[in-house]
Image: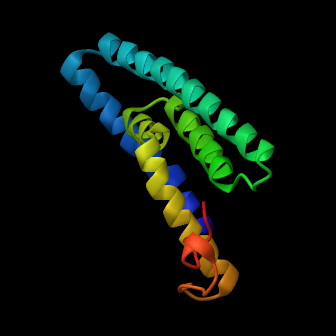
Amino acid sequence: MAGILALLFLVVPLVELAVILQVGSTIGALNAIALLIAISLAGGWLMRREGLGVVRRLQLAMQQGRMPGPELVDGFLIVLGGALMLTPGFVTDAAGLCLLLPQVRNVLRRVIGRRLAVRALGHRPGPVPGAGGSGGYIDL
């Protein structure tokens, strides 16, 4: 895990720099900087909008007396997406924007739920009799 993080901290800035230089040489340095600022502002707005929606769903879940698992995962993904959007660069902006889209978060939430189930159970879960609509998976 530490090796992967080290690689990310080395590779991502180099890729970002190469992309920024390429975009800057194509549209001009000032236009590239303006585009990066505009994308960051749009990302901040989108993060706020999506975050407020998650807070409303979190409050509703608490009022209904149910565990807010999906809302917590969405909140984490939105914060991560917002952090990526605030990081200067087109590649991280694209990744952050993807995390701010509800459709992408739905897919990631299912993947995270399956991975958590595998870690908790030690094997891939199968249908559990009487488990309701979850089919034996952790509902995230």
Q: How is the image coloured?
A: rainbow
Q: Is residue 140 left or right of residue 42?
A: right
Q: Which quadrant of the figure has residue 23? A: top left
Which residue ends up furthest to the left in the rendered image? Answer: 26
**Depicted 13 relative to depicted 115: above or below:** above
Residue 98: image location, x then y, percent: 42, 42
**Depicted 8 relative to depicted 49: above or below:** below
Residue for point 60% across, 87% down: 129
Residue 7: image location, x then y, percent: 50, 59
Of the 4 image quadrants, the one containing the N terminus is: bottom right
**Depicted 22 relative to depicted 64: above or below:** above
Residue for point 68% across, 56% down: 69
Residue for point 49% across, 38% down: 100
Residue 121: image location, x then y, percent: 67, 85
Nearest the viewer among 114 and 43 is 114
Q: Which quadrant of the figure has residue 53? A: top right
Of the 4 image quadrants, the one containing the C terminus is: bottom right
Nearest the viewer among 95 and 68 is 68
Nearest the viewer among 119 and 72 is 72
Residue 112: image location, x then y, percent: 56, 64
Nearest the viewer among 138 and 111 is 138
